[in-house]
Image (cartoon, rainbow, N blue to C red):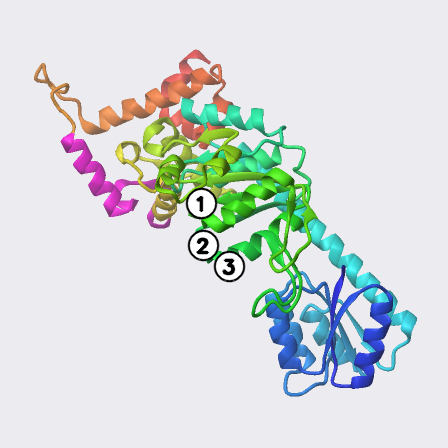
Amino acid sequence: MTRVLIVDNEPSILSVLSTLLKAEGFDVMATREGKKAQDTIRAEHFDLMITDIRMQPVDGMQLLKTARMEAPTMAVIMLTAYGSVESAIEAMKLGAFDYVAKPFKVDEILITIQRALDYNKALTENMDLKAQLGARYEFDNIVAESEAMRQVCEMIERVAPTDQTVLINGESGTGKELVAKAIHMHSRRRESKFLAVNCAALPEALLESEMFGHVKGAFTGASSDKEGLFESCEGGTIMLDEIGSMPLSIQGKLLRVLQEKEVRRVGSNKNVAVNARVLAATNSHLEDDIKAGTFREDLFYRLSVIPILVRPLRERRDDILPLVYHFIREEMPDVQDLPTVEPEVCDILSRYDWPGNVRELDNCVKHALTFAKNSKITPQDLPPRIVNASVTGASAESMESFGRDGSWAPLKSFLRDKEQAYIEHVLARVDGNKERAATALKISLATLYRKLPDLNKDD
């Protein structure tokens, strides 16, 4: 039901508008106090606000600014008895949809309200579409040079068309949410919402309300009914991140939702049918949690119909350098000739164990680009802790395989050969197509030729 907030210091205006809009089927809340309206906007969702401009101590312009900051998707219609052009222009600049002068005609304000709601609906649908397109693009950006990530991509393609629950396991920063979004965007539900909730970030009472919703008066502060994620994500996909942190009391309710396909809001005695696919993610071993008595075994088997393991970056080192070039391109989408990465940098990044996984590598690339000079990333541009850890790790390796015959290759020569071997590997994978190789490496074709000048000999 469309919710409308009416704010005016004239009781007669509040009465007329409330009666009129309730007769049209709207859920209406009316108040004479601007301060109360501000607090309400912050606490509750409304589709439309109709407010007078001239009020004290909080006027309509202040309410409009609050609405734009706290509820940017809410449409706002301004009322005034003065009809000044200046006020109308200022209100429009601040984001008001329209401006109605008092005294107004019933037909006039109803038409304005409908236009505002129609415009807002189109705007919201456009925002959802952009978000969906963004998620679809994210799947194309999953870097899968390693065999482990190729297997993950194959799993995504297999499970996406189904409605089975999926349990995504992996350390923090490995990209579990990216996998979940990819599953959603390649499913029949891709035109509907994708919602994610971090079970470890919310206290028990708030998590329960967030997931299942609540009715007015269910607890202190519940001033109106609220849909939970399962209701608001009808036909879509819900990702429950850090599922191992979910309290046992809520685990039982989640199990019922998965089994019965219905939810019961907090404080209600009625069940509501829901249709949302559940994807769960965890960085812990749920089998250990089951033994410890902190996770329900029946819920585990219900969630892990399809398990997907996203391995840590240290176990798929073939992805490290491709990810580096991928992140550089993400940070510099409009630059044709990307910064070059010195061979020493490639070696350091390949040696490091990345305890923070892909997220840490992304931050490392951002750090390097910030300090890079002359379009070149050098070891000096990397975070010192990563350089130091790499040096320590390298010194710990056995050096017996080097210099056994008394000869030693210069470091730059060794790293150059390593980089060239990687480029040749990519070229082989794309059947020698240099343009495709340059695209895969996220470098310009000119840079590719400079790095492998001997390529021209066969052309």
Q: Is residue 384 magenta?
A: yes
**Residue plotted at (63% across, 87% down):** 57
CA–CA distance between discs 2 and 3? 12 Å
Can you identify the residue that label 3 sits on? 205
Tag 1: amino acid:
Glu
Can you identify the residue that label 1 sits on? 242
Between 95 and 452, the one lying in front of the other is 95
CA–CA distance between discs 3 and 1? 17 Å
Predominant SS of the magenta segment:
helix
Q: Is residue 134 visible?
A: no
User: 20 left or right of 91?
Assistant: right
Tag 3: amino acid:
Ala
User: 272 left or right of 266?
Assistant: right
Q: Quadrant of residue 215?
A: bottom right
What's the magenta region?
370-396
Q: Residue furthest bottom?
A: 56
Q: Is residue 95 above or below residue 201?
A: below
Can you identify the residue that label 2 sits on? 201
Tag 2: amino acid:
Ala
Q: Return the x and y of residue 443 as percentages of the image width and height.
A: 44, 32
Q: Are marks 1 and 2 in contact (CB under 8 Å)?
A: yes
Q: Residue furthest left?
A: 406
Q: Is residue 98 above or below residue 408?
A: below
